[in-house]
Amino acid sequence: MFDNLSQRLSNTVAKLRGQSRLTEDNIKETLREVRMALLEADVALTVVRSFIERVREKAVGQEVIENLTPGQALIKVVQDELVHLMGDANEQLQLNAQAPAIIMMAGLQGAGKTTTIAKLAKRLKEQEKKKISVVSCDVYRPAAIKQLETLAGQIEVNFIPSAADESPLAIATRAVEAAKLNHDDVLFIDTAGRLHVDGDMMGEIIQLHQAVNPVETLFVVDSMSGQDAAMSAQAFNEALPLTGVILTKTDGDARGGAALSVREITGKPIKFLGTGEKVDGLEPFHPDRVASRILGMGDVLSLVEEAQQKVDHKEADKLAKKIKSGKSFNMLDLRSQLSQMQNMGGMAGLMDKLPGTAKLPAAMKSQAGDKSVQSMIAIIDSMTAKERRFPDIIKSTRKQRIAAGSGTQVQDVNRLLKQHIQMQKMMKKFSKKGGMKNLMRSMQGRLPPNMPM
Amino acid sequence: MTDRSLFNRLKSGLAKTRDLLSPGFSNQKAAELELSDELLENFEERLLMADVGIELVQTLINQLKLDVAQAKREHLPTTVSDLFKKLVVALLEPCNQAIMLGDNKPFAILVVGVNGAGKTTTIGKLARRLKRNRKQVMLAAGDTFRAAAVEQLVTWGERNDVPVVAQATGADSAAVIFDALESAKARNIDVLIADTAGRLHTQNDLMTELQKVKRVMQKVDPAAPHETLLVIDASMGQNALRQAQEFHRSMQLTGLCITKLDGTAKGGVVLSIADQLGLPIRYIGVGEAIEDLQVFDAVQFADALLGLEPDT
Ligand SMILES: Nc1nc2c(ncn2[C@@H]2O[C@H](COP(=O)(O)OP(=O)(O)OP(=O)(O)O)[C@@H](O)[C@H]2O)c(=O)[nH]1
Ligand SMILES: Nc1nc2c(ncn2[C@@H]2O[C@H](COP(=O)(O)OP(=O)(O)O)[C@@H](O)[C@H]2O)c(=O)[nH]1
Ligand SMILES: [Mg+2]
Ligand SMILES: [Mg+2]
C-alpha cells in the first residue's frame, strides 16, 4: 500500500531538483501535484486542504539549509508534516485498568473488527501472557457469533457464548461478570458493524460503551476506504470516546489515504495495521515509518522488526547483523532470506518496506511473485553445501545438475546467481555510511528486471 | 414497493451527495451562468468528495465548460444541472443492463470481490429477489476459508428457504461449487449462486484459485458461469477502480453490484469504473435486510447522485 502516493510524491519532488531556492512560485506546481496525489490516495479533501496550507507556510517561510537541495528541503517539510499529521510516536494498547481490561471494537460493516480481535488477542496472549476472553455482541450479521467462536478456538482463548436472540447490552454485561469470575486480564467485546448515520445502532453502541466502560475503544477502518472515511470517523469519534484506530487490509494496494484522514479528524492514534486475513496479520503502526514509506523512503527498520517477530530471534539477529556489516552474503543467507520473505507475505510484502521500491513499476513487483521465490529456494536446495558457500564455483555442468535437480532451467539458475551477486553488492552499499541514499540511487530505475528486490 | 418509494429509499441513501451537488447549480440557466473559476473549483471539490476520481472530475469539468459555452452560443434553455446530468447519464447509461437468464438452466452466478464487500449478503438478497420471480434457487458455499462463512450463507439459505450446497470450512472451494452446479442441474434448478471467499485483487495465488473455480464450472457447463458478478463497496475510494480492473482482467467480469449505498458514501468511483470498463451494473445494495437490493438504474442513480428530482 501507499505505493502510488510514494511514486507520485517522489516524482513531483524530483522536479524541483537543481533550483536554488524555494519560493511561493516554484512550490506552487509541486504543491498542486502533492494535492492531487493525496486526493488520488483518498485522503479526505478537508485534510488535504489543511495539509497543503501547513506545508506551504512552512516551506516558504524557511531558508533552504546549506547542503540540501530545494527538493530535499521540501520533502523534509512534507515528511515532517506527514509525521505530525499521523501522530508523533507509536502508541501501544493501554491496559492499565482493574482486571478485566475491556477492549471494545467499533466500525462500519465489513471493516475487519472480528478478525482484528483474534489478531490482538493472539498478540496479547503470546507476547504479554495475558489471560483473555472474547465475546460477540453482533446479533445481526448471520453467523457473526460463530465466526468469533471459531477464531477464539484457533488462537485458544476463552470464548464467552452469546446468542442472536439476546440483547447486545445483556450479552456485554453478562460477559464482564463472567470475565471477572474467570480472572481474565483482558476481555474483548466485538460489536456489529454499523453505519454512522444509523441513529438506532449508534445509540446502541453508545449504551454498550457506557455499560462496560472499556479501557480501549478501537475504531476499525478499512484502508481501502474513500472520502467517506472522514465522515464515519468523525461520527464514531463524536459518539464514543475512541482511544485508537486500527487500519485493516493494508496487504492490498490501496494508497491508504484514509490513514491520514482518520488520524487528523479523530486525533486518535493509529495503533495497528492489519496486514492479512490470518490471525498473525497484524503490525504495530509507526507514524514516522509510514510517512517515510509514503515519501518513497522505505521502511527498513520495520522490516528488521518484523523479521524478529516471525523468524526465530537468532536468525533475525544474524540477518540484521549481516545487513549492517555487508559481510559475505552467501547462498545460505539468500535462502534464509527468501524463506523469511515467504513468511512475511512474499516479495510484495517485503518490497513494500524497502527503500526506493515505490519507483518499481507494479508489473515488475508482481513478477517477483511467490512462485519465483519458491523456485529460487528449490534451486538453492539443489546445490551442494560447498556450492552454497562458494557460489563462484558454479559453472556449466554444475548449473545443469542444479537445474535438473530443482526442476528449473539453466537460465533460472543463472538468474539466481546474478541476483545473488546483485544482492551482495546492495548489502555492501547499504552497510556503508550514507548507505540508505546509495541504496536508493542504485535501485531507482536501474534494477535489472529480474532483481528480487 | 412502488417506484416512487424505491426512489425515495435510494435518494435518502444518497442524500449526502444530493446536498453536496445541488446548491448553486440546480436551476441556473446555463446560458445565463458565469462559470467562474471559483465555482468550477468548488464543483470539482464536491465531485472529489463523492469519490469521483480526479482525472474523471477534470474531464467532466472540461466537458461541462464546453457544454455551457455551447448553450450560450445557441441560447439553449437548459440548466447547468441538466447538462451535468446528461454527462453523468451518458457515462452510466451503457451500464444499465439487467441480467438475462435466457435458456440457461441452471443459470450460474459466481460472486466475487474483496474482503467484506458484501458478497454473501448480496447473495442472500438476490436469492429473495429471484424467488419472488418464481425461480428455483440454489446457493453454493464457496467461501471455505473465512471463519463461519459457510454458516453465514446457510443462514441466508434458511431465510430464503432455498437449498445450500456446502462442505466444511477448509474444503476445496472449486469442488464445492462443482458439486453444487451438478446438483443444481440434476434438480432442475433455475439459478445457482456461488459465494466465494473475499480476496484482494493483488493476491495472485487467490486470483488463480478463482480462475480454477471458473474452469471447474465449465466442466459441467461450458458457458458457466453465466454471470461473474463483482461486488464493490460504495465506501471504497479509488481502490475500487483497481479492484474492478484486476478482477476483470483475471475473471472476465460480466457485471457489478454496488453495496452499502445506504450510508453517506457516494459511490462516485462507479463513474470511473463505468468510464474505464463499461461493465453492466446489475444491482445496488441499500441496507442489510433481505429486501435491500435494487436493480441499478442509470437515470435514477444520476438523479440521486446529482440531487435532482426524477422526471415525472
Ligand atoms: N449498510 C449496508 N451493509 C451491508 C450491505 N451489504 C452488506 N452489508 C454488510 O457488510 C458486512 C459484510 O457483508 P458480507 O456479505 O459478509 O461481505 P462479504 O463480501 O461476503 O465478506 P467476506 O466473505 O468476509 O469477504 C455485513 O455486516 C453486511 O451486513 C449494504 O448494502 N448496506
Ligand atoms: N486481506 C485482509 N483481509 C482482512 C483483514 N482484516 C480482515 N479481513 C477480512 O475482511 C473481511 C471482514 O472482516 P470481519 O472481521 O468479518 O469484519 P467485521 O464485519 O468488521 O467484523 C473478512 O473476510 C476478513 O477475513 C486484513 O488485514 N487483510
Ligand atoms: Mg464482525
Ligand atoms: Mg462472505
Image (tube, grey):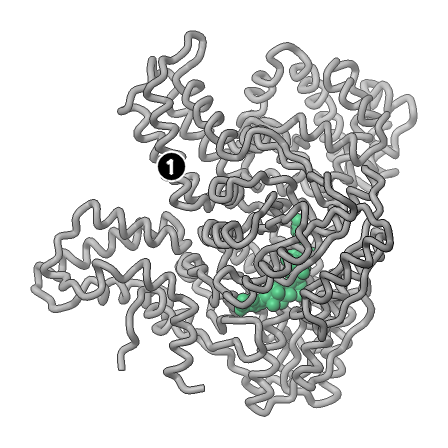
Residue A270: name its quadrant.
Answer: top right
Label 1 belongs to which residue? Answer: A50
In this rendering, would B55 be left or right of A144? left
**Nearest the eye: A122 or A281:** A122
In this rendering, would B175 be left or right of A274? right
In this rendering, would B260 be left or right of A344? left
Q: The C terminus of chain A is located in which quarter? A: top right
| Residue A362, image x, y percentages | 56, 41
Residue at figure coordinates x 46%, y 46% from the top left: A42
| Residue B14, image x, y percentages | 40, 66
**Nearest the eye: A234 or A419:** A234
Amino acid, disc 1? Ser
Residue A64: name its quadrant.
Answer: top left
Is residue A404 shown above or below B153? above
| Residue B18, image x, y percentages | 33, 64
Neighbor class of circle 1 (other Cα within 10 Å; few <14, some 14-19, many 20+) is few
Chain of the residue that carries numbered disc 1 in the rendered image? A
**Nearest the eye: B204 or A247:** A247
Q: The N terminus of chain A is located in which quarter? A: top right
| Residue B253, image x, y percentages | 55, 65
The picture quadrant for ligand 1 comes to bottom right
Is residue A82 shown above or below B60? above
Residue at figure coordinates x 13%, y 64% from the top left: B29
